[in-house]
């Protein structure tokens, strides 16, 4: 088994087993592997090469997991003779590496956001942007089904603005907004761009005390955001496509009860996104 194909099928096997890199490393280390966690993660991402012994230890670890979940897939070992990948003289068959890469790509695509840790950042972002496109909401007109939720949030929390935002490659597009926010804001300064990187809420009681945002143009200038609370909204295969958020021009404490109420409204927005798909 050539090294590149073994690497690709190892990544595919880990994805199919649903293992995060740290989980895989713990099981691998228990089998006698000598790589550090950082080294193993670098190998999975294709950044470094490792010895055939360590590759085979990793393959053994994965095969035990795959067998335990009754999967018929297996990661080949270095000395395996794969008829489907080699000709009679033992030479790699043209296209076999492409076939292996296709298996990996399809497995990771099927996993969606759950497979993020096995993807390069640009690969994950490409999949996320595809999910944004699949909402078919970017650059569309306002809709009452979203507007009624943002109006309710603005009134209930007594804030200046509430919005449903979609984060595209370059901009934050507001599908629904009440209050002093522009429909299109550069993504790199949008506070919601930070929210989509999280599995849960982003609550900022006072932006001027937060190192990430105290010099942000939306904080130092219009609309002078001092308070922000947002929840990520998810599209196909679990990718974060945008946010539901509220802002105000004065700092405030946001209680656990208020967070729960905001989450309930965010789930109402999520329901509308799910219906769209």
Image: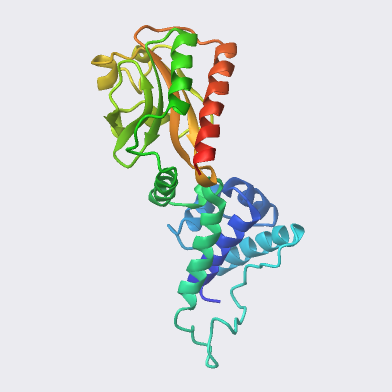
Q: Position of residue 256 (x, y in %)?
A: 58, 13
Residue located 35% across and 12% down the image: 226
Q: Residue furthest bottom?
A: 88
- What's the colour scheme? rainbow
User: Depth check: 254 or 92 in front?
Assistant: 254
Q: Position of residue 90 (x, y in %)?
A: 53, 88
Q: Is residue 160 above or below residue 237?
A: above
> How many marks can you see?
0
Q: Residue 10, can we see it?
A: yes
Q: Is residue 42 above or below residue 268?
A: below
Q: Position of residue 105 (x, y in %)?
A: 49, 61
Residue located 63% across and 64% down the image: 59
Residue located 30% across and 35% down the image: 171
Q: Is residue 124 above or below residue 65?
A: above
Q: Residue 196, can we see it?
A: no
Q: Quadrant of residue 213?
A: top left
Q: Left or right: 206 with respect to 59? A: left
User: Depth check: 78 or 220 in front?
Assistant: 220
Q: Residue furthest front?
A: 144
Residue located 44% across and 50% down the image: 127
């Amino acid at each position: 088994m050539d090294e590149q194909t073994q690497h690709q099928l190892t990544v595919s096997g880990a994805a199919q087993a649903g293992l995060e890199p740290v989980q895989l490393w713990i099981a691998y280390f228990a089998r006698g592997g000598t790589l550090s966690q950082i080294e193993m993660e670098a190998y999975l991402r294709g950044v470094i090469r490792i010895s055939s012994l360590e590759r085979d230890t990793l393959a053994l670890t994965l095969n035990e997991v795959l067998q335990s979940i009754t999967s018929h897939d297996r990661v080949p070992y270095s000395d395996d003779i794969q008829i489907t990948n080699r000709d009679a003289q033992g030479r790699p068959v043209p296209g076999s590496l492409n076939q292996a890469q296709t298996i990996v790509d399809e497995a990771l695509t099927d996993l969606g956001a759950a497979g993020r840790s096995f993807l390069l950042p640009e690969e994950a972002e490409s999949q996320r942007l595809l999910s944004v496109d699949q909402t078919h909401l970017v650059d569309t007109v306002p809709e009452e089904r979203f507007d009624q939720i943002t109006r309710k949030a603005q009134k209930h929390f007594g804030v200046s603005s509430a919005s449903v935002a979609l984060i595209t490659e370059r901009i934050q597009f507001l599908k629904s907004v009440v209050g002093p926010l522009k429909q299109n804001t550069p993504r790199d300064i949008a506070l919601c761009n930070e929210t989509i990187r999280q599995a849960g809420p982003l609550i900022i009681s006072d932006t001027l005390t937060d190192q990430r945002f105290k010099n942000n143009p939306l904080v130092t200038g219009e609309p002078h955001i001092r308070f922000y609370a947002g929840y990520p909204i998810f599209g196909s295969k679990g990718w974060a496509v945008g946010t539901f958020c509220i802002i105000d021009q004065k700092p405030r404490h946001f209680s656990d009860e208020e967070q729960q109420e905001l989450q309930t409204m965010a789930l109402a927005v999520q329901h509308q996104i799910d219906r769209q798909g």
